[in-house]
Image (cartoon, rainbow, N blue to C red):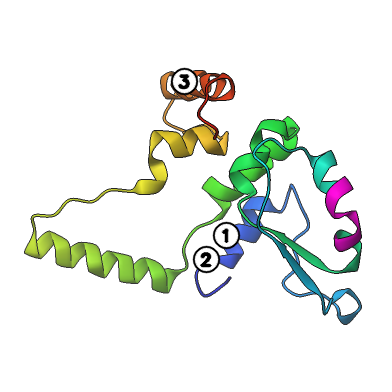
């Protein structure tokens, strides 16, 4: 984690919300890991608890593809924390930032180039359930699209 992200920034951003530890004591280390890849689109925390209760108590459970499916059913405080982690707490570490700057300078000097940040496409904002941070107009557009996505044939 700390080779890619700024761990101190992550901890500092979330310190008022959750307790973050850098390592687990040996009493909490678990030898068993279970990966579940087939998660339905409309799920709840209760469904996860009922379906995976045994695995949650036996070891580490990794739920692949859960991030864009759970936001519709999360309590607002957990949704705010989820968005805070994704869009405020995660910041790349200095070495990664430096490589990005070198690449950007090289593209600028050798120009012209086109850059597209795929993670900020409208459908990604709809699936995250987070506010864009671009102001109330954009937040309203995303909220309207989220309502439409719940009733349309497009499953997000």
Q: Which secondary structure is most common in the magenta stretch? A: helix
The residue nearer to you, when weighing 31 against 136, is 31
The circle on residue 9 is 1
Mark earlier in primary sequence (1, 3): 1
Q: Residue at x 42, y 19 (%)?
A: 137
Q: Nearer the viewer, mark 1 or mark 3?
A: 3
Which badge, 2 or 3, is on the more N-terminal residue? 2
Residue at 82% x, 80% y: name it.
31
Quadrant containing the N terminus in the rendered view: bottom right
Query: Label 1 to label 3, Cα distance in Å?
Result: 27 Å
Q: Nearer the viewer, mark 1 or mark 2?
A: 2
Residue 53 within the segment the image draws in magenta: yes
Residue at position x 68%, y 43% in the image: 40
Image coordinates for residue 75, horizontal then vertical, percent: 76, 32
Give the magenta range: 50-55
Q: Circle 2 is placed at which residue position?
A: 5
Q: Is residue 141 above or below residue 92?
A: above
**Position of 113 relative to 122 (above/below):** below
Cα separation between marks 2 and 3: 29 Å
- Looking at the rendered structure, the secondary structure element under dot 1 is helix
Tag 3's secondary structure? helix
Q: Residue 136: which numbered mark, if any?
A: 3
Q: Which mark is residue 89?
A: none
Evaluate if marks 1 and 3 touch, with contact meaning CB atoms under 8 Å apart. Answer: no
Quadrant of the drawing holding the C terminus:
top right
Q: Position of residue 111 (x, y in %)?
A: 8, 58
- Give x and y (percent) for residue 3: 52, 75
Q: Is residue 54 magenta?
A: yes
């Amino acid at each position: 984690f700390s080779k890619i992200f700024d761990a101190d920034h992550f901890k500092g951003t979330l310190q008022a919300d959750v307790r973050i530890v850098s390592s687990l004591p040996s009493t909490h280390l678990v030898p068993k890991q279970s990966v579940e890849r087939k998660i339905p689109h409309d799920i709840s925390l209760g469904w996860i608890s009922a379906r995976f209760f045994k695995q949650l108590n036996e070891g580490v459970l990794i739920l692949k593809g859960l991030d864009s499916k759970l936001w519709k059913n999360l309590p607002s405080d957990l949704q705010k924390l989820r968005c805070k982690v994704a869009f405020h707490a995660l910041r790349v570490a200095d070495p990664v930032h430096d490589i990005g700057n070198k690449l950007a300078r090289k593209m600028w000097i050798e120009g012209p180039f086109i850059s597209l940040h795929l993670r900020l496409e409208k459908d990604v904002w709809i699936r995250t359930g987070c506010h864009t941070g671009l102001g109330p107009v954009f937040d309203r557009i995303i909220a309207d699209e989220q309502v439409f996505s719940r009733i349309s044939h497009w499953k997000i």
